[in-house]
Amino acid sequence: MGVLNPQKSCQDATGAINLHPAAPTYRGLGSQHYAIYYNDETYGPTCHHLAPSVDSGQIIDVARFHVARAETASSLRLHVGADAMGMRGFYV
């Protein structure tokens, strides 16, 4: 996975969006580890416009779900991925 070239990714007048598999609090990859470490009560994917810096575009929507006590970083990654795919139908 890499970061898109801003000149190429923003040429379309309608822009582009990203389904980030984490809450806006956490940018970049592996965010589920932070949520587990900090005992976050909720978590979920963020849909946002692409911007020159990673995961910093204007937020379109955030879906949140309760983080179960037994949740692990691996299970949370799968859970948020499934939720992000659900958002896909609305925004992509």
Image: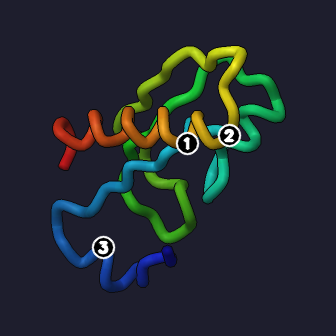
| 48 relative position to 89: left or right | right
Could you say which is closer to the camera, residue 26 or residue 32?
32
Q: How many dots with numbers?
A: 3
Amino acid type assigned to the residue bearing label 1 in the image: Arg
Within 10 angstroms of label 1, few (less than 14), some, or many (20 or more) residues?
some
Within 10 angstroms of label 2, few (less than 14), some, or many (20 or more) residues?
some
Residue 18's disc number: none
The reply to whether callout 2 and callout 1 are in contact (CB within 8 Å) is yes
CA distance for labels 3 and 2 = 33 Å
Q: Looking at the image, is mark 3 or mark 1 earlier in the sequence?
A: 3
Amino acid type assigned to the residue bearing label 3 in the image: Cys
Q: Position of residue 10 (x, y in %)?
A: 30, 73
Which residue was labeled with disc 2? 73
Where disc 3 sits, the SS reads loop
Labels 3, 2: front one? 2
Look at 50% across and 77% down and name the residue there.
2
Look at 50% across and 31% down and name the residue there.
44
Q: Position of residue 16 (x, y in %)?
A: 28, 62
Where disc 2 sits, the SS reads helix
Could you say which is closer to the camera, residue 10 or residue 3?
3
Amino acid type assigned to the residue bearing label 2 in the image: Ala
Residue 77's disc number: 1
Which residue was labeled with disc 3? 10
Tell me which corner region of the image, top left, top right, bottom left or bottom right, holds residue 18: bottom left
Decide: is 83 above or below 68.
below
